[in-house]
Every structure is written in structure tokens, then in C-alpha cells.
């Protein structure tokens, strides 16, 4: 839960998702009750007022839960639900119509279980029944807190809380050292809601691999963090850095993390660290100093034509998205293969 202005807010909640709270045997038994179903973006998984009683368990993707308001087409979003979440349980447990609409933010995959099968399973498995009751109780409290937030917080305060919650959720529930190949939830949610074409795609942007000090001994991050501060902005060097970061992210993080870069036609990628080293119990044994924190800002200013560079703004970003294709890295052999693949421009780097 995010505290904003003294009021707790919860779009996603901090409860462990239903499927992840099950034991492996329980999870296998629950999934065996139903069948897999796929939904495209904007599809309704459940509809407010409908008399159906089946439940859904999200396997992949994210959905919104919303209710109608007195303002016509305006809907109040009660929450976001992601992988492992149980949906539609209220209609399965009582004879009333659906109380909310569930809509897919992007391609979504679910397990669909009939209400009768789900009720029989709960009757035979008291622990799982307890998990469902706990989820219902938590969501009721969350709805009360949401109403309080609507009455007492400004739009900006609520937006800040939502963005923070999305960022935390994108890191939640992963074992230490595991890789998140699904991309950033905040990025993905926004990109899924934007049109696939439009003037915003031509707005220059810079993406930064933050906290790069955590990778400071790994090629190609070590090469860029180890460079002396630039005395001038070199478009060719910026394109080279973009290629290196693209390759690193594509191999070690996955294509989902590159969605903003692939969607925006004029974009650069950068390595940066605010401290230059890792903290240990509040101290920096090797000293602290920012590394390459100005380069992304200068590149962004140059892309907008606010800083003069050789060749002008177009020297940084030329061509249409996606301007990079994954190809074997010619540099991989010289850097220990950390980059794996790099961006190869179709004519010119982005």
C-alpha cells in the first residue's frame, strides 16, 4: 500500500496473488478444474451486471477492474490485477450479478473455471477457502481506502501514488538474483494504452540504464562507466552507447524492456550511476561520485535541437522504429560476450 497525504492507497494491493499463495499440489488441482483462454487487448473478461458465475486466474497479462459511475461513459477503476490473481470469485459465491467489469490492458491469458467446480473445490479444501476469504476482505478494505483517497487527495497525489505502486509491483515477488524479462509494468501499462501511431512517437526521448554501478564490472557497462567525463557531445559515441545498452538489455533483460525504445522513433540509450559504486551499511568504501549522469540530458537536449552538435539533431536519431535489429555482436568476442547482441542500424542508428 502507498501512503499519500496520510491516507493509504491501493491500486494493486500488497497481498500475495492467489495462485502464488497455493501449494504446488493445490495449484495443480485448481488449474485442472478449468481450461485456458486468451484475450486480446481491450477485451472484456468479465462484465458488470452479467449473470455468469465462472472465475478466472490470470496466467499472463494485466487487467483493469472498473465500475460504472453516474457520469455516463466515465468508469471508476478500482484496481489492476496481474499474473496469479483470482477474479470473479464474488459471483461464484453468491447469486448476484457481476459487480465490476474486468478489461484486458494487453494480450492476456487466463484459466477459466466454472463457478460450480470452484465452489466444490473450496468445500473440500478449507485452506484455499481461507485464502479466498482473506482476498475478499483485503479488497473490501482497499475499496474503502480508495473512496477515502478520492475524497481527500488531489489528482496529482493519487497519480504519484499509482506510479510508485506500479514501480514497486514490477519488482515484487521475484527471488533475489532472478531476472525480470517481462519489462517495466508502468512502461508497459502506458504503452498498451497509447495509439500505435501518432505524433508522440516523433517526440525525442532518452532511456537510461539506472543504478549501472550494480553492473560496473560487466561489459559493456564497465567500458562506459570507466570513461572520463566527455568534454563535448559526440553523436557517433552516443549511437555506440545506444547499441551497447540495446544489446545488453535484449540479452539479459529481454525485449519487453526495450519497448519504449522500439516504439519511439527518436530515442537514445545510456548508462548512468548516481554514486559510481555500491553502498555498504550507509557508506561507500570506494568513494561515491556520479558517472555519466549528464550525458542522457545533453543527448535529449541535442535531439530537441537545444544543444548544437556536429550534424545537428538528426545525427543522433535517423530512421523509423524499430531502427535496431538483433544481430551477433562483433564486439562480443572482445568484451567477453556480455552484450550478446547489439543493435545494428538499418542504414543509421536511431
Image: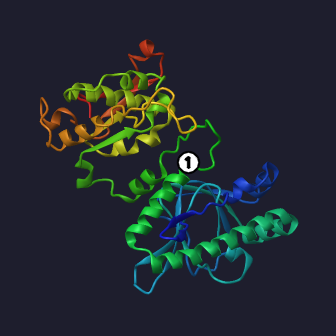
Q: Considering the image in quadrants, where does the N terminus appear?
A: bottom right
Residue 304 shown left or right of residue 11 in the figure: left
Q: Residue 192: percent from the left, percent from the top?
A: 41, 56
Residue corresponding to mark 1: 171
Q: Residue 88: percent from the left, percent from the top?
A: 65, 70
Question: Quadrant of residue 189 in the image?
Answer: bottom left
Q: Residue 6: percent from the left, percent from the top?
A: 52, 71
Decide if residue 63 is in sight here.
Answer: yes
Decide if residue 100 is in sight here.
Answer: no
The correct choice, above or below, for 80 with respect to 341 in the image is below
The correct choice, above or below, for 289 with respect to 93 in the image is above
Q: Nearer the viewer, residue 94 or 51?
A: 94
The correct choice, above or below, for 47 with respect to 25 in the image is below
Residue 170 shown left or right of residue 115 in the figure: left
Residue at the (23%, 28%) spot, across then down: 347
Q: Residue furthest right?
A: 124
Question: Quadrant of residue 341 in the image?
Answer: top left
Q: Nearer the viewer, residue 70 or 289?
A: 289
Number of numbered tags placed on the structure image = 1
Question: Quadrant of residue 295 in the image?
Answer: top left
- Tell me, what colour scheme is on the image? rainbow
The correct choice, above or below, for 75 with respect to 42 in the image is below
Q: Considering the image in quadrants, where does the C terminus appear?
A: top left
Residue at the (53%, 50%) spot, across then down: 170
Q: Residue 36: percent from the left, percent from the top?
A: 65, 55
Q: Secondary structure at mark 1?
A: loop
Residue 54 shown left or right of residue 315 in the figure: right
Q: Nearer the viewer, residue 278 or 163?
A: 278
Amino acid at each position: 500500500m502507498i501512503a499519500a497525504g496520510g491516507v493509504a492507497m491501493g491500486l494493486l494491493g500488497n497481498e500475495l496473488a492467489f495462485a502464488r499463495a497455493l501449494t504446488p499440489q493445490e495449484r495443480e488441482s485448481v488449474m485442472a478444474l478449468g481450461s485456458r483462454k486468451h484475450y486480446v487487448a481491450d477485451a472484456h473478461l468479465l462484465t458488470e451486471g452479467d449473470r455468469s458465475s465462472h472465475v478466472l486466474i490470470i496466467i499472463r497479462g494485466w487487467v483493469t477492474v472498473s465500475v460504472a459511475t453516474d457520469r455516463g461513459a466515465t468508469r471508476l477503476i478500482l484496481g489492476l490485477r496481474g499474473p496469479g490473481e483470482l477474479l470473479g470469485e464474488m459471483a461464484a459465491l453468491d447469486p448476484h450479478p457481476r459487480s465490476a467489469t474486468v478489461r484486458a490492458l494487453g494480450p492476456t491469458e487466463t484459466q477459466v473455471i466454472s463457478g460450480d467446480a470452484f465452489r466444490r473445490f473450496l468445500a473440500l479444501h478449507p485452506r484455499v477457502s481461507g485464502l479466498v476469504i482473506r482476498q475478499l476482505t483485503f479488497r473490501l478494505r482497499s475499496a474503502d481506502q480508495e473512496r477515502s483517497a478520492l475524497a481527500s487527495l488531489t489528482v496529482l497525489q493519487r497519480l504519484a501514488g499509482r506510479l510508485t505502486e506500479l514501480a514497486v509491483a514490477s519488482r515484487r515477488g521475484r527471488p533475489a538474483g532472478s531476472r525480470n524479462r517481462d519489462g517495466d509494468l508502468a512502461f508497459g501499462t502506458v504503452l498498451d494504452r497509447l495509439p500505435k501511431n501518432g505524433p508522440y512517437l516523433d517526440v525525442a526521448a532518452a532511456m537510461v540504464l539506472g543504478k549501472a554501478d550494480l553492473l560496473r564490472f560487466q561489459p559493456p557497462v564497465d567500458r562506459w562507466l570507466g570513461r572520463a567525463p566527455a568534454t563535448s557531445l559526440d553523436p557517433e559515441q552516443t549511437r555506440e552507447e545506444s547499441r551497447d545498452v540495446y544489446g545488453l538489455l535484449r540479452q539479459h533483460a529481454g525485449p519487453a524492456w526495450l519497448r519504449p525504445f522500439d516504439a519511439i522513433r527518436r530515442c537514445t540509450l545510456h548508462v548512468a550511476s548516481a554514486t559510481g559504486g555500491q553502498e555498504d551499511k550507509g557508506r561507500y568504501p570506494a568513494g561515491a561520485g556520479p558517472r555519466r549522469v549528464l550525458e542522457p540530458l545533453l543527448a535529449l537536449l541535442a535531439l530537441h535541437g537545444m544543444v548544437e552538435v556536429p550534424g545537428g539533431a538528426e545525427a543522433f536519431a535517423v530512421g523509423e522504429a524499430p531502427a535496431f535489429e538483433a544481430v551477433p555482436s562483433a564486439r562480443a568476442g572482445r568484451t567477453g560476450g556480455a552484450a550478446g547482441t547489439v543493435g545494428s542500424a538499418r542504414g543509421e542508428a536511431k
